[in-house]
Amino acid sequence: METAAAAVSTQSKVQFRAHRDALGDALVSLGAEYPNLVVVDPDVRVSTRSEAFFDAYPDRYVCTGIAEQNAMGVATGLASWGYTPVVPLYAVFAAGKAADQVLNSIAYSRSNVKIVGTHGGVNVGADGPSHQAIVDLGVMRSIPGMVVLTVADASEVEPALRAALSHEGPVYLRLERAATPVLGWGDIPFAIGNGLIVRDGSDLAIVAIGSMVFEGLRAADELQRQGISARVINMRSLKPMDSAMVERAAEETAGVITVEDHNEYGGLRSAVAEALAAIGAGPMRWVAVEDRFAESGTCSELREMCGLTAARIVERALDLVNARSHAYE
Amino acid sequence: MSESGTKVLKLKQRARAIRKYIITMTTESGSGHPGPALSLVEIIAALYFAEMRYDPAQPDKIDRDRFVLSKGHGVPALYGALIAAGFVSPQEMKRFRHADGLLAGHPCLKTPGVDACSGSLGTGLSIACGMAKGAKMRGSSARVFAVVGDGESDEGQIWEAALFAAHQRLDNLLVFTDRNKLQYSGSTSDVLRLEPLADKWRAFGWAVWEIDGHDFADILGSLQEAREVYGKPKMIIAHTVKGKGISFMEGSQKYHGKPASPEEGQRALLELEEKPL
């Protein structure tokens, strides 16, 4: 278990960086280390920043045109030659339009393909629901043998991609489009199957993914002011999930709150509930998109609209703590 | 007999053996798709016994020629070829479609000699494209062969792959369309019109042949010509008959996804034995 407790202050001035900018850099640097790394691109290299890889290694870049299904099949065929194809594309299309090819071509043959969903959650913003991925984690998590990774900020992109490349088999890595606060855990090795405790606490536990980890930290600050000590966990390896870390959180605190920019079904909430149900632990609360489509708008507008805020986490936390204390009366 | 006559006779013997395997495995397991397998027997026999380079002792050898059955439901024909070529024991036919066997209902990698998972229609051709592109990137002389169904060509992914293969100049990719003119609910012309199919592939940038898919001279001739074509992927539209080789299955939709009864299976095997090559 890695701990980055107290490494981050949400009070000081934070820097922002887009995950995909880090992806472009990581593809170039890891491209040098991994000569079999090739990029298969369904014509979104500007959006995904895989253009940097295209510029650096044009012979290891394959464009399929706007054809996501074919891209997944081509990646499968390339993998049969010992290549490690990375397919960066909008998360909503990876897990939607190309879901059959991810399942039946890549996963069924256990092909060594790394799918990078670059536009996770409603945090896509103005392009609207057609381009926002709120079911990708549920789809990918339910595919046999698929590893599902997320990042809390741009600094985790390179370590996450490195972890994906050192794993033999299919991996889905979810990024977000927007520039999000840089929390700086990039130096901590990214291990598949491990979560990261980013703040210690004993009254309750906030288990978050993606840039919602930052909202979790902000909520923990507010709860601290109200005398409640919240543990914050970055569950960056969603599958396999760090069940032991979740179980300990449930046992050592009043309960767990999951926080994700994803629909409330199939993603982090489901994963944590599955782990807790197995040991008969509870209760839990969740902050997620409440089974709806968002709108076109700014990222902050949409997160407000969908209740994906620190304030909402605080509200759910207080509800959990109050329910627990009533139960003991 | 001339050298080519001997070659064709041997291929006809292979085709008969593969047909017997198809009938045996589907009838004994009471499951599978005999009709769509029987139409591609000559194609697969020509590929495995006159064209492809492979070693049954090393099914994963990196420079082998690869084969992708994109119309995965025709897999009894592929298993027949793999048994005849020595990749798989004939004993496995008893466990066709059984959980503990090596021969699944649609192609998958647990079977020695199967190069790609397929069965979800439209997906196999894209994998074949990736294999052909990979061979070029590796500087390998390996070639990739595939069979798509005519009904399968309703799938949009087939045409995504068609664009890709031509754009990438994948002249190491050769694809047959098993043009048996029947799909699940009826004739391909009634369900969703494909014609002019050869023109479509030509317009997509492929070199195209139209042949009798049960005539080895035609198949071998087109394969020979295809070897001399550079810079383009190759499509051989093979006109075939669903259920070919078994009188009561020919042209019939009944045996698309349903095997022969045990009595019918006996009749079919007898027919194959008695019919002159």
Image (spheres, rainbow, N blue to C red):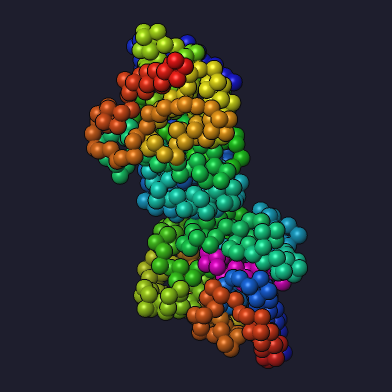
In depth, the one of B228 and A147 nearer the eye is A147
* Residue drawn at 61 percent across, 58 percent down: B108
Vertical comparison of B1 with A252: above or below: below
Is residue A131 visible from the viewing direction of this image? yes
Q: Is residue A205 visible?
A: no
Query: Which quadrant, please, contains the N terminus of chain B?
Result: bottom right
Can you name the residue that lies furthest to the front here? A329
Q: Position of residue A80 (x, y in %)?
A: 59, 51
- State the image coordinates of residue B35 (x, y, percent, origin top left): 55, 77
* Quarter placement of the C terminus of chain B: bottom right
Measuring 59% from the left and 26% from the top, which residue is drawn there? A244
* Residue at the spot 37% in from the left edge and 68% down from the top edge: B203
From the viewer's perspective, tell me whether residue B265 is left or right of residue A9.
right
Q: Number of labelled discs? A: 0
Residue A6 drawn in magenta: no
In front here: A63 or A125? A125
Res A208 → quadrant: top left
> Which of the 4 image quadrants contains residue A32?
top right
Q: Is residue B23 left or right of residue A311?
A: right
- The magenta-colored residue range is B69-85
Residue A66 screen position, x and y as percent = 37, 51
* Rendered view: B93 above or below A24: below
In this picture, residue A11 sits left or right of residue A39: left
Residue B194 screen position, x and y as percent:
38, 74
Quick check: is B75 in the magenta stretch? Answer: yes
Compared with A67, B249 (above or below) is below
- Residue in the picture at 73% in, 57% down: B58
Q: Main secondary structure of the magenta part?
A: helix
